[in-house]
Amino acid sequence: MRRFTEGFHGYAVALFVCLAGAGLFLLVTPQSREEHIPRLDYTITVANFGHQVPYGVWAPRQDPPGWVPNSNRIAKGENGAQVLYLGYATAKRQHVMFAQSNERPAAGFASRMANSDKATGTQQIGGVTWEQRHREDKNQRTLVRVLPDVTLVITGTADWPELGELAAQLQQRPQG
């Protein structure tokens, strides 16, 4: 029996037993080949944001088909303004973020979110005109809509039609 616990042969047998055990463990452990993106409900965050700001909050009526909401938060912006962020993985698995704030001047907020202050065009969505901004070196497209009391920004790596899908779902909720 000592022969198996000493010398090179003992080492080789111990290594083989360990590798066989690890292989057997990997073989019987269930493995999912499906992508898993955590889904985070944002309804409470949107409601809390609505209690903090003096205007009706904008939020999607429903998420576009195949989109997964995966992040949300409320943060302080410039000059004490509040900012609501809702993040998504789109149906094409690109990243999109919807942000809104009553920060003034609105152009500063929009430029920071878009990483650009240059409009590259406009896009009509549901009868409403959104300003387009494109930052090619970051593969970032942004839609901006400046309203009297709030600035809406939809930005990310998604293409223009996907950004438009989210913009089409936005509606203003009653204040308070």
Image (cartoon, rainbow, N blue to C red):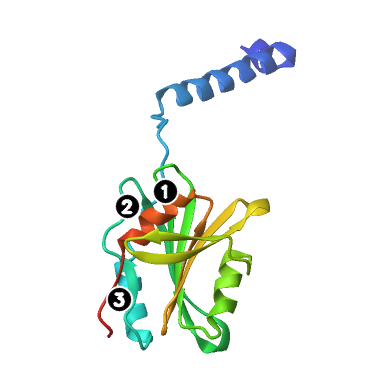
Picture quadrant where residue 69 is located: bottom left
The kind of secondary structure element at disc 2 is loop
Disc count in the image?
A: 3
Rendered-image quadrant of the C terminus: bottom left
Q: Position of residue 115 (x, y in %)?
A: 63, 65
Q: Amino acid at mark 1?
A: Thr
Answer few, some or many: residues within 10 Å of disc 1's Cα (few below 14, many 20 plus, some between 14 and 19): many
Which residue lies under the disc numbered 1? 90
Which residue lies under the disc numbered 2? 64
Q: CA distance from mark 1 to mark 3?
A: 23 Å
Q: Earlier in the sequence, mark 1 or mark 3?
A: 3
Answer few, some or many: residues within 10 Å of disc 3's Cα (few below 14, many 20 plus, some between 14 and 19): some
Q: Earlier in the sequence, mark 1 or mark 2?
A: 2
CB-based contact (under 8 Å), mark 1 and mark 2 = yes
Q: Is residue 100 left or right of residue 11?
A: left
Which residue lies under the disc numbered 3? 47
Q: Is residue 81 left or right of residue 120?
A: left
Answer few, some or many: residues within 10 Å of disc 2's Cα (few below 14, many 20 plus, some between 14 and 19): some
Q: Residue at x 45, y 65 (%)?
A: 130
Front one among 53 and 3 = 53
